[in-house]
Amino acid sequence: MPPGMPCGNSAYVNGVWQDFDTTPPSWFTVEQAASSTLEPLYDIWSWILFQYSQWRWSEREGSWAKYLGWLLIPLILLLVRRLYTRKRIKRSKGEKAERLEVDTRSGMDSAFYLIERKLLVHGYERKPWESLFKWFKRIEEETSGDFSSESLEAILALHYRYRFDPNGITGEERDRLGALVQDWLAERKN
């Protein structure tokens, strides 16, 4: 190439090298009409592949950087797997939430909660870590025998079965629980 000659398309006009563009003026509109809406994604993907190829084939022999490319493959596979399982987890959580709604409703209408409310009204607050049985024992100790936890053992056993047993209780047992609770409340009207 002669000295002073510019790179690209040039023409020697009147003794001087001048830039010469052969692109037709309608090129941009024709190209834009023919392109896909996903063209920016293709461009980004091509750029990523170019950068990867440039890095991969660079002259960094003997450095740890050449092994970094092999690390990308499992990381990409891990990312794809994580995205796939996240969708499955979301679906299963939704199904589980529906099942939990049904499960938590069973036994929530237990007549035992009337006793619990009555005890709360009388100032016997249950500690968050206390089981119902331990709560009753503590109330029994605080009242010096005026309160008997033994009278609640049968009620508590039925309540626990109604509330937590997957098979629940029969209609007769539910009626019995209601009657036992009403009897207990009637004995302690004050």
Image (tube, grey):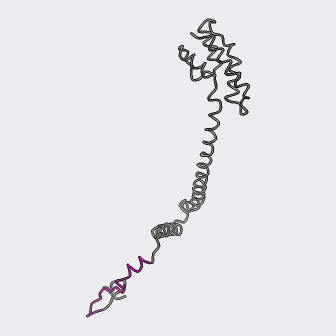
Within the image, what quadrant is residue 128 found in? Answer: top right
Q: Position of residue 147 (x, y in %)?
A: 63, 9
Vertical side of 103 occupied by 14: above or below: below
Vertical side of 33 occupied by 123: above or below: above
Quadrant housing the C terminus: top right
What is the residue that sits farthest to the bottom in this orientation? 14
Quadrant housing the N terminus: bottom left
Taking 24 as reference, is 183 left or right? Answer: right
Q: Position of residue 17 (x, y in %)?
A: 29, 88
Q: Is residue 51 magenta?
A: no
Within the image, what quadrant is residue 112 found in? Answer: top right
Q: Is residue 17 magenta?
A: yes
Nearest the viewer among 113 and 80 is 113
Nearest the viewer among 33 and 106 is 106
Which span of residues is magenta-colored?
13-33
Query: In percent of the image, x 69 and y 28: which residue is there?
Result: 162
Query: In percent of the image, x 59 and y 9: which residue is there?
Result: 142
Query: In percent of the image, x 62 and y 47: which residue is there?
Result: 92
Nearest the viewer among 28 and 67 is 28
Vertical side of 135 occupied by 12: above or below: below
What is the residue that sits farthest to the left in this orientation? 14
Vertical side of 63 occupied by 117: above or below: above
Taking 1 as reference, is 64 left or right? Answer: right
Query: In percent of the image, x 62 and y 12: which residue is there?
Result: 186
Nearest the viewer among 168 and 54 is 168
Q: Position of residue 68 (x, y in %)?
A: 55, 60
Taking 22 as reference, is 183 left or right? Answer: right
